[in-house]
Image: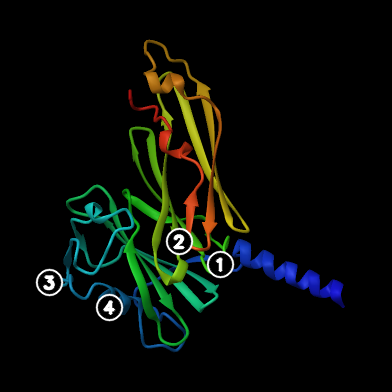
Amino acid sequence: MRRFLRIGLAVIALAWNTGLKAETVRVEPDSAVTPGSTIRYRDLVTSLLPDILGDGSKADVTPGKGIRHIGGADMLAYTVQTEPQSISRLDFVSPAGKRALILFDFGTAEDAAQSVAILGLYDLAGEPKLLDAADVGYDRFTSFQAPEIAFAAPDAPVTFFRSSHLNAGEEYVQTSLVSLAGDRINLIDSIGTMNWNGCAWSIMSDLGFRATSGTIRATIHIRKTKLDGTGCEPNRNERRIRPGRIDGTYVWEASRKRFKARTAAFKSIPFPGGDE
């Protein structure tokens, strides 16, 4: 009996630590948020932005008007269409109960380079109740990033987002780790990577995450391939980047209810397109 109990507890722990039941789905603005409910996703947009809807077609988003950006107040200053281009939803269970993360992608702002991707955290115990909201967009396209959600600490789910844009064969990516501890949306870290097709080298970087008890491990695998390079001179960063891996660790500090980076390696990643 004890053996079966241990096996059962191990399975429960695995499901908690990996978030096996969490899966992102796309939803339509006019569909019901919960079965049988009269509340639609379009209603959530109205309740999410009550002070900034303007004339109903555009909204000016600035600090102090109910929405914050996980990267800080200097990331907020743009005009956005109030009709989301897409809505994605991720359901999970926290110690406090059933929760849903709903990502409203409003597309690229009129007067800023980044997309406006407002994340709402909702309590689904009854009718959807907004617990917190923040803009998680860093670049032109923003979406959930695998593994989407992880449970490295019992009361602090972590979710992941990928913002990117393409420019002349170069892909710039900003990946955000976001804590949901205490039903609040807070940035843990934002990691910049780049996929580069130059004339001398092709440099590709893949970022992945693994959650264990009390720890989130991030690894960047860098692949570098020599190209023909006829008639071109690689810049300094392109020459100095080496293939291999870069590792980083984020450790849960229970007393402060936060994850803390145990490495600064991601802050000094050279981008091949610069000569810094």
Which of the marked residues, 3 or 2, is nearer the chain's N terminus?
Answer: 3
At mark 3, the secondary structure is loop
Residue 118 vs residue 216, the one in the foreground: 216
Which of the marked residues, 3 or 1, is nearer the chain's N terminus?
Answer: 1
At mark 2, the secondary structure is strand
The amino acid beneath tag 2 is: Ser
Q: Label 1 belongs to which residue?
A: 22
Looking at the rendered image, the quarter that the C terminus falls into is top left
Q: Label 2 belongs to which residue?
A: 179
**Residue 166 occupies which quadrant of the picture?**
top left
Q: Label 3 belongs to which residue?
A: 55
What's the CA distance linking mark 4 and mark 1?
A: 25 Å
* 157 over 171 or under it: above or below: below
What's the CA distance linking mark 4 and mark 3?
A: 15 Å
Circle 1 crowding by C-alpha within 10 Å: few under 14, some 14–19, many from 20:
some
* 177 over 1 or under it: above or below: above
Residue 233 rendering spot, x and y as whole percentages: 37, 13
Q: Does the residue at mark 2 contact the one at mark 4 (Cβ under 8 Å)?
A: no
Q: Residue at x 42, y 50 (%)?
A: 189
What's the CA distance linking mark 2 and mark 4?
A: 23 Å
- Mark nearest the camera among 3 and 1 is 1
Q: Residue at x 47, y 24 (%)?
A: 241
Q: Residue at x 45, y 71 (%)?
A: 182
Question: In the current view of this chain or complex, which residue is farthest to the top?
Answer: 231
Residue 260 vs residue 234, the one in the foreground: 260
Q: Label 4 belongs to which residue?
A: 47
Circle 3 crowding by C-alpha within 10 Å: few under 14, some 14–19, many from 20:
few
The amino acid beneath tag 3 is: Asp
At mark 4, the secondary structure is helix
What's the CA distance linking mark 3 and mark 2?
A: 34 Å
